[in-house]
Amino acid sequence: MKIVVVGGVAGGMSAAARARRLAEDAEIVVLERGEYVSFANCGLPYHVGEEIADRASLLLQTPASLHAALNLDVRTGHEVVSIDPAAKQVIARTPHGGTTVVDYDALVLSPGATPIRPPIEGLDLPQVTTLRTVPDADTLRALVTDSARRAVVLGAGFIGLEAAEALRMRGLEVDLVDLAPHVLPPLDSELAELLDAELTSRGVTTYIGLAATSITRTLGADHLVEVTLSDGTVLPADMVVLSVGVRPDTHLAAAAGLELGAGGAIVVDNAQRTSDPSIWAVGDATAVRHGVTGVVAPVPLAGPANRQGRRAADSIFGRLTEATLARPVLGTAVVRVFGLTAAVTGASQHMLRQAGIVHHVVHTHPGHHAGYFPGSEQIHMTVAFAPDGRLLGAQAVGRAGVDKRIDVLATALAAGMTMDDVAELELAYAPPYGSAKDPVNMAGMVAQNVLDGSLTLWYPHQLEEVAATSLIVDVRSHGEFRRGHLAGAMNVPHTEVRAHLEQIREAAAGRPVRVHCASGFRSYLAHRILVQEGFDSANLSGGMLTLRAARPDVELVTG
Ligand code: FAD
C-alpha cells in the first residue's frame, strides 16, 4: 500500500502518523510545499507576542525526526501542482524547480485554507502580512522593529484578536478593524461587547462595522503606510495584519474533478472519502455538517482536522466502525483576549435564527467558584436550548473558569443532553474550583425554570416595547438604583417586594410588571413572589449586566 499525503501539518500529519501506526509495511510519502511540517500554527500569534520566545519550539517535528520515529518519507518544498485520479498519480514541483511524479494507492488531501484577500488596494505592500505560516510570523516579527509604533489588524475573528493582543504586548498602538457589527462574529453580541471593552481598556482601538478600502505607502511621515476605512477614517500604521478569514484551498481538488460543495470545500463522506474512492480529504479544505444547525460548511479548527486525519487513515485500512465514522462538528472554540477568555460551542443565537431553529436563551453571570472563596470571577454565559429542552449552544466570557464550562457543555451537546441533564451533571466541587451548584448546573436550572413556566423572561431587545406597555420594577438596592436605572422604572428592593405589593399593583394599573436586578437572580425571587400574587410578571434575562452589554445605546437615569 502506498499512501501519499498532500499537506504536512495538522490533518495531513495526523493521517500519515496514524497510517504508520496501523501498517508498518505501508509506503507513506508526505508532500509539503512549505519549508516546515508539523508546525504549531496555533502557536504563531504567541511567538509574535514573545510569549513563545523560542521559534524552534513551534517546529514540533522535522522530516528527519518523522523518518526516525515513524519511517515517513516527508518531502518539504514539494508543491503538488496536479492530481491524475485515473493514473493515481500526483505531480509535484520540487525545491530546485523540477517536477516529480508520485504514484499512490490512496491519496489524502489536507491542503488547508488560504487567507481571503478582499479587493483592498495596497495588499501587496511589504508592510502587509497574513498570519498563517512560520514565515508569516517571521515577517511580522521583523516588522516589529524599534521604530515601529503602530499596527492595524484587519479582521477581529479568532486570529485577528490573537494578533492584536500579540502586537499590543509588543508595545505597539493597535487598531482593530472589522466589517461585522461586533468583534469575534461567532460570539453573541451581548458577550462580544465585553471583549470590545477589554480591548479598549488594554489600548486596542476597535473600528466596528467598517471595512478597509485601501492601504497606501506614506513618504516622509513617522509611519510607513496609511489604511483608509470605508467611512473615510485614515489609520497610520507601520504594519498591517490581514486576518479577514479563510477559504478552503481546493484548486487542486477542483482541477482533479472532485466534488466540491459549500464555500468551495471538498465534499467528503463520514469516512473522509471524496467523490473519488481512492482519495480522502481532511481539515480546513473540507466541509462538515454542523451538529446543531445541520448546515454543511468548512469549520477551520485544529481539533476536527486532527481527528479527521486519524479517521482517513483508519478508513484507508478498513478499520472504521459505525462508532468511529465522522460525527457532526460543534465548532467548539476558545480565545484569550488579554485578561478575558471567550469560548463557544454549538450554535450561537445568530446561527439559530438563520437556521430557523426555535429556541430559548438564558443569560447567567455566576462566579467561577464559590463567592466566599477569595478571587471569584464572574462568568458571563448565554445558553440556548430547544422548547423540548435539548441543549443547542453555549457561550461564555470571563476571567477564569470559562474554558472548563464550555468544554463541559460541549460534551453535553455531543451527548445530546437536555437542560434537565445539564442541571443534574455531577461536577467536581471544592470552593477554590467551583460551586456546589456549578455555573453549568445553574444554567440548566434556569433553563428548567423557563421550561416549566416558573420563570418568564424578557430580553434587552424588547426594552422599548416593555417600557411602553409595562411597569418596570428595579429590585436592586436603593444605592444601585441611584447610580443608574432605566427611565420610568420603579425601585423596590427585592427584600421589600412582599411589603410593597399594593404600591406595585397601584403603579402597574393593570399593566404587566417587568422586573430586573443586576444579574437576574434577585429579580427571579421577586418574580416568583409577584407571580404567586397574581401579577403578570417577567424577569429580564441576565439583568442589567446583560442589558448594558447588549444595549450600550440605552442611557441610564441617575439619582
Ligand atoms: P494546515 O494545518 O494549514 O496544513 C495545510 C498544509 O498544506 C500547509 O502547510 C500548506 O503549505 C500545505 N499545502 C497546501 N497546498 C499544498 C500543495 N499543493 N502541495 C503541498 N502542500 C500543500 N485552530 C484551533 O482549533 N485553535 C486555535 O487556537 C487555532 N489557532 C490558529 C492560529 C493561527 C495563526 C492559524 C493560522 C490557525 C489556527 N487554528 C486554530 C486553525 C488550525 O490551525 C487549522 O484549522 C488546522 O491547522 C487545519 O489543518 P489542515 O491540515 O487542514 O491545514
Image: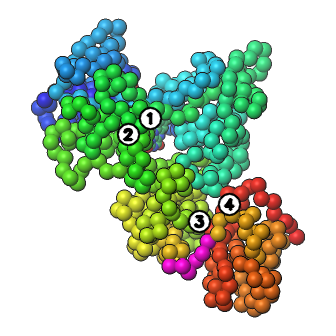
Report the Cα–Cα distance between label 3 and label 2: 31 Å
The residue where tag 3 is placed is: 363
Marked residue nearer the N-terminal end (2 or 4): 2
Instruction: Indicate which disc, 4 or 1, sits on the residue closer to the N terminus.
Output: 1
Farthest-out residue, right: 559
Query: Which residue position holds label 1?
Result: 263
The residue lying at 64 percent from left, 56 percent from top is 190
> Left or right: where does residue 254 sit relative to residue 535?
left
Disc 1 residue type (three-letter): Gly
Whether residue 459 is visible: yes
Ligand 1 shows up in which quadrant of the image? top left
Tell whether label 2 touches label 1 (CB within 8 Å). yes
Give the CA separation, mark 4 to mark 1.
32 Å
Examine the rendered structure and indicate whether residue 298 appears above or below residue 77: below
Task: Tell me the SS state at disc 3.
Answer: strand
Amino acid type, callout 4? His
Q: What label sits on residue 287 in the rendered view?
A: 2
Image height of 69 relative to 321, above or below: above
Q: Earlier in the sequence, mark 1 or mark 2?
A: 1
Task: Please state which of residues 447 and 235 is positioned toward the viewer in this rendering.
Answer: 447
Whether 130 is drawn above or below 161: the answer is above
Badge 3: residue crowd in 10 Å (few <14, some 14–19, many ≥20): many
Would you say 541 lies left or right of 288 here?
A: right
Name the amino acid, label 2.
Answer: Ala
* Residue found 69% across the figure and 64% down from its top: 462
Name the front one of labels 1 and 3: 1
Per the rendering, the mark at residue 461 is 4
Tell me the SS state at disc 2. Answer: loop
Residue numbers of the magenta segment: 452-457
